[in-house]
Image (tube, helix red, strand yellow):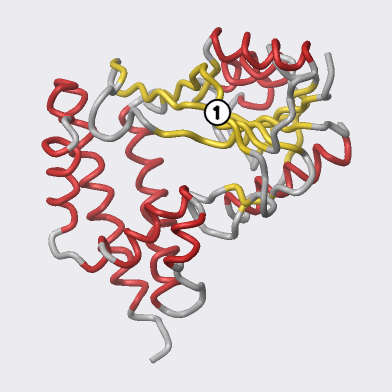
Amino acid sequence: MTGRLAGYVLTRDEEATVERAVGSLRRIADAVVVIDSGSTDRTRELATRAGARVVVHPFESFPAQRNWAIEHLARTERPEFIVTLDADEWLTDELVDEVLSLRRAGCLDADAYLFHRRVRFDGRELRWGGFAHTWLPRLFRAHGARYEERAVNEHLVLPAGAKIKRLRGDLVNDDLDSWEDYIAKHNRYSTLEAAARVAVQCGDQEPTTLRDALRFRYLRRRWLRQHVWDRLPARPALRFLQIYLLAGGVLDGRAGFRRALFEAWQEMCTDLKAEALARQCPT
């Protein structure tokens, strides 16, 4: 094997899925580290049993935690490449075989590799609703990559001129272990998204420029949200219609309907929390 590879998973109370995520990473990585931010369940015990080294680090924000993980792995494992999964994700056999083949052939020559994400929800893979065409940079060189400072939906920032490739295999995301946990998780995400929105409105963070949106594909959706979407009325209703009707979520049956409702609910929660936070902006 060429190109030493280390993987990490961020966790907090992920006992239902952490073994699967760690086991998936171990198929392609030389070392797997779980960065835990204070789990109160069996997450750390199960991660260790699955073959990961567990490190506890206080949570400040998602980008801060991810950047700390990158620095920690670079210092302790000295990898050439880093791969990361969320605790509710795993790699398909095709993607595992593809990465291993590249490593054996010494052909990991890009700065970052994009994984195609498949989303499972309510017992079904979502093929419509806009969830089937997402590519994420999850395998990248250990030096030079950093996550932007944003409360949620943070993106990996690569050096100018970085070489990026796509892999054919899939990354599977299934973040629904129980409805109670799902609702709680996305309630937290709406809080973070509201804070990120208000940071731009209050001038604490620069909005995405059109120039950057044209240069970086991953910033185009954010530019549209900041400069178009966030100014529209009745966004929760529009979000439901966008997913369920315009993007064909109706074709995913019950799962498509429920996911569209949840996305609309999260949009409403974000709006309400952002309005409350915006009142605290300096005039």
| Amino acid type, label 1 | Arg
Work out whether 166 lies above or below 24: below
Horizontal arrangement in the rendering, residue 248 relative to residue 223 (left or right)? left
Percent position of residue 28, x then y: 70, 16
The answer to which image quadrant residue 167 occupies is top right
Image location (x, y in percent) of residue 8:
69, 31
Answer with left or right where residue 276 lies relative to residue 106: left
- Quarter of the image for residue 196 reads bottom left
Which residue is located at x 74 percent, y 15 percent?
51
Residue pointed to by mark 1: 166
**Position in image of residue 7 (x %, y %):** 71, 28
Q: Secondary structure at mark 1?
A: strand
Location of residue 236 with respect to 48 vertically, above or below: below
How many marks are shown on the rendered structure? 1
Q: Quadrant of the N terminus?
A: top right
199 or 109, nearer to the observer: 109
Looking at this view, is 52 or 26 the one in front? 26
126 relative to 152, above or below: above
Residue at point 24% right, 27% down? 128
Q: Which residue is at the front of the view, 283 or 97?
A: 97
How packed mark 1 is, by other alpha carbons closer than 10 Å (few <14, some 14-19, many 20 or more), is some
**Hey, which quadrant is residue 270 in on the image?**
bottom left
Q: Nearer the viewer, residue 149 or 39?
A: 149
Where residue 48 appears, as percent x and y from the top left, is 73, 20
Q: Residue at x 51, y 52 (%)?
A: 216
- Please tell me which residue is depicted at 41% across the width and 49% down the height of the picture: 188
Q: Left or right: 106 with respect to 136?
A: right
Quarter of the figure that contains the C terminus: bottom left
